[in-house]
Amino acid sequence: MTLHADYQTDNIFAKMLRGDVPCVKVFEDDVALAFMDIFPQTEGHTLVIPKGVEARNFLDMPTDKLGAYMERVQKVARAVEKALKPDGLRVIQFNGASAGQTVYHLHFHIMPIREGDSARPHASGAPADMGQLNALADQIAAHL
Ligand code: AMP
């Protein structure tokens, strides 16, 4: 997928926003939805997506909606940090397939990092245990 293409309404995150596909929800308001990554690269890997926009990536995001969305990204990142107390935290965002993007609705990854642990490969492997993901989502949500 190139950087410049039309937004596809059948992407998996758009389906989540419509309620057509389930997600392990952490946070939702009128601006953003946050949920657990189903192929977590580290324990607590969380995604935050904007609502009400057809933005494939960061470049597409309407500038007047960016500030409110980034506030939610920070809000969720702070809750992840408080809940899981990692040694570090990656906040990452990919634009275009060659940069590593696999889902074409804007999202930020929030990835807790523990010293000595290495992150698993991106968007691959077996999906995480749903019970564990739900427990992590509850832990993070308790700090929102
Ligand atoms: P990116 O490659 O930056 O577009 O990130 C997409 C992310 O979405 C990857 O980390 C995937 O593991 C994650 N992902 C794909 N499908 C789902 C899903 N159904 N629920 C939660 N996360 C997903």
Image (tube, grey):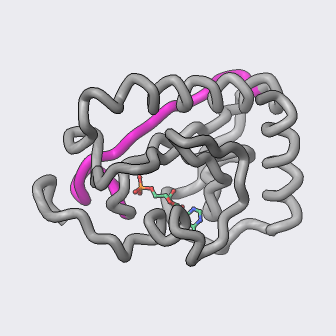
Q: How many marks?
A: 0
Say if the magenta span includes residue 94: yes
* Image location of residue 92, percent across then percent down: 44, 36
Question: Quadrant location of residue 69?
Answer: top left
* Image location of residue 142, percent across then percent down: 86, 34
The magenta-colored residue range is 86-102
- Eyeballing the image, is 27 above or below 22? above
- Residue depicted at 48% across the width and 47% down the height: 49
* Image location of residue 62, percent across then percent down: 25, 37
Question: Quadrant location of residue 89?
Answer: top right
Quarter of the picture containing the N terminus is: bottom left
* Image location of residue 22, percent across then percent down: 66, 71
Does residue 108 appear to the left or right of 16 in the view shown? left
- Eyeballing the image, is 50 above or below 80? below
Question: Quadrant location of residue 115?
Answer: top right
- Eyeballing the image, is 76 above or below 30? above
- Residue depicted at 80% across the width and 68% down the height: 129
Does residue 101 appear to the left or right of 42 in the view shown? left
Does residue 8 appear to the left or right of 16 in the view shown? left
Say if the magenta span includes residue 36: no
- Residue depicted at 25% across the width and 29% down the height: 63
Q: Nearer the viewer, residue 34 or 136?
A: 34
Quarter of the picture containing the C terminus is: top right
Does residue 122 appear to the left or right of 119 in the view shown? left
